[in-house]
Amino acid sequence: MEPFRFHLFICTQQKPEGVPSCPASGSLAVLEGLDREVQKRGLRPDLQLTTCGCMGLCNEGPVMVVYPEGVWYRRVQSSDVSEIVDAHLLHDKPVNRLVWNDAPAMRAMSIEHGEKFRAAMAAREKAGTLPDRLDQMIRGYMPSRCILTALELDIFTAIGEGANAEQIGTRIHANARAAEMLLNALVALGLVTKSGGIYSNTPESARFFVQESKDNHRNGLLHTANIWHRWSTLTDAVRHGTCIPIDPHNNARDSTPEWTANFIAGMDRNAKARAQLLVQALGTAGVRRILDLGGGSGAYSIAFAKASSDVRCEILDVPEVVPLTTEYVNKARVSAQVNLRSGDMLTDDLGSGYDIIMLNAICHMFSEEQNQQLFRRARQALAPNGRFVVQDFILNSDKTGPLHTALFSLNMLVATDHGASYSEREYSSWMKNAGFADIFRIKLPGPSDLIVGLAK
């Protein structure tokens, strides 16, 4: 049974550099082109496009199979996509110059590939070779550091419409030879192209990393570059159980205005993508007053204000953040509905009579004791039937996953005095002890969920 008129399988099995594979021959570009053409031609309801693992025909890649007929294509390039869609998918005429119908040869090649692969794996096992999976995890910092350095130097903006290494080095005030080495690595990573000594941005890097782009993420990603320095202290942080000064003689890196601006920009990048999800999950019916604790850029309050003209939000954040929040709120044109207050949520009076109190990506910065105290104070600040909403990365019951959340807990170890990721059981227990009722979890798309408690 085929639920779709056509079902296309394209090999995207990544293999070590230098080993023949469909991705090395361009299958990812073919996949992207097919997705674009299928959408453009209105074929999406009639077609399923599926990536798959190795078919054992690596030397003939990119390989693609079209069902229900079972037509095999080989050496497909992105330039062939339009022809395949037009001839085969629209007019049921396979592109014969790309069709591979020598079944005995295909079978023999696939069997030979499997035998060679198993023999190679056996030899590696016998020799005690480090598995690729482990090697890639251990060396994962290399491409990360390459991109972060490029962002710190603003190299993508310096590339402009295209320039050579010497020109780019001059623009970023860097050594030309070293700049060329970095640029070549960025080419290898697929973030920059090179032709005749001229480097150019890819559409992807031009969109997300160039300063003038409307979708520029550089400023927010500089926070990740700052985190890099913190992670270098992980060994000592594990030994001591808390964050360690990056420089014992100067620990001011995390308190500069530039650091704070980058941090808020990074948080805004994440929050804007999730704010609408939170508003949809909670709704605005009967909501008049919201307290947004540690609101940062104000993304969540802004989303609520735009969703309902009846909502009034109050953001409480530390003095060095509030001026930045003001800029975000004014830019969103909701200053009439969003009030800002400087203070410390752990010690200052929270107020009273709120319909919703939000803690978005805040609890992981605090210790268990600090969170429990804050939960009790939030309970007192809510109106009857008000909701206390925690959004955060939530660990499973034995705290071994999800992977992102387990790693983020280490991020809190190296960056805070007592912060960590917590489990649903811990959040629910804290809310129950604080006097909340009907405690429940709302799962959202993405890495974080909501834990909600009612003030009855």
Image (cartoon, rainbow, N blue to C red):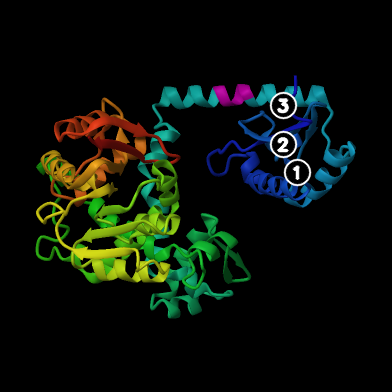
Query: Residue 359 at what x, y percent from top left?
Result: 26, 48
Query: Which quadrant holds residue 106?
Result: top right
Q: Which residues are magenta?
A: 114-118
Task: Kindly report the distance in space between the C-alpha atoms of the residues bearing marks 2 and 3.
Answer: 13 Å
The residue pinned by badge 1 equals 76
At a point 80% along the width and 49% down the height, the residue shown is 82
Q: How many numbered dots are placed on residues in this image?
A: 3
Asked whether the viewer can see residue 145, the reply is no
Quick one: label 2 or label 3, which is nearer the N terminus? 2
What is the spatial separation of the Cα atoms under label 3 and label 1, in whole angstroms?
18 Å
User: Of helix, strand and loop, which mostly describes the magenta segment?
Assistant: helix
In the displayed structure, 455 sits above or below 347; it is above
Residue 344 visible, this orientation: yes
Q: Label for residue 109?
A: 3
Left or right, residue 291 beside residue 20: left
Seen at 12% across and 66% down, the residue is 250
Which mark is first along the chain, 1 or 2? 2
Mark 2 is on which residue type? Val
Label 2 sits on residue: 63
Residue at position x 29%, y 29% in the image: 400
